[in-house]
Amino acid sequence: MRGGEYENVLPRRAECILDLRFSVGHSLQEILERIEIEDGCDIILKGSVDPVSVRPTDPVPRALTRAIITSGAKPILLRKLGSSDMNHISNYVRSCAAYGPGDSSLAHTDRERIQLKDLEFSVAVYKKAIEILSDSFSSIEATHSNF
């Protein structure tokens, strides 16, 4: 938030940039309507991305879960409440998921860190998930070619 030049003078103009994120079940319009606009105030919307919800049984989350299990780890499913690349691609793909190494509660903070072994594990999981997805699509094609 910026406004004025001096702390002890009421500014003629103020500016505030908000990065608002909202979950499935809410709309941009609803959020904008809840923001009270005083006389002389303007909202300039610089962009928006709709929220996305993914079911654990969708193909990509299911493949990632199977890949994690077959790699010897226990998957932990989280409901991601921020935004990610999923928000940008969900209208163009049949299935997507957010997955990666590290502690998601530390993402985008000055304490965000990942260990090289965790990165290598995640790369192996992605490779296995791609194999699982490829096999599942191949079996679907084989089933349909018999008709």
Image (cartoon, rainbow, N blue to C red):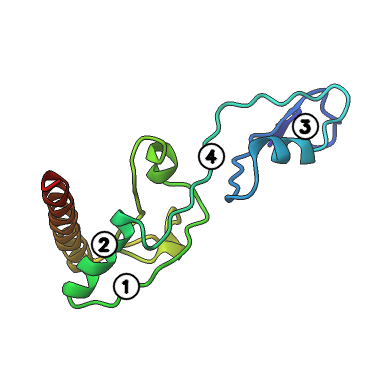
Badge 3 marks a residue whose secondary structure is loop
Q: CA distance from mark 3 to mark 2?
A: 54 Å
Q: Which amino acid type is shown beneath numbered disc 1?
A: Pro
Judging by the rendered image, the residue that carries numbered circle 1 is 75
| Extreme-right residue of the structure | 39
Mark 3–mark 2 contact, CB under 8 Å?
no
Mark 4–mark 2 contact, CB under 8 Å?
no
| Extreme-front residue of the structure | 147
How far from the left and from the top, in percent, is residue 91? Answer: 41, 36
Could you tell me which residue is drawn at 32 percent across and 59 percent down? 61
CA neighbours of label 4 inside 10 A, class few (<14), some (14 to 19), many (20+)? some
Is residue 114 visible to the viewer in this orientation of the structure?
Answer: no
Q: CA distance from mark 1 to mark 3?
A: 53 Å
Mark 1–mark 2 contact, CB under 8 Å?
yes
Badge 4 marks a residue whose secondary structure is loop
CA neighbours of label 1 inside 10 A, class few (<14), some (14 to 19), many (20+)? few
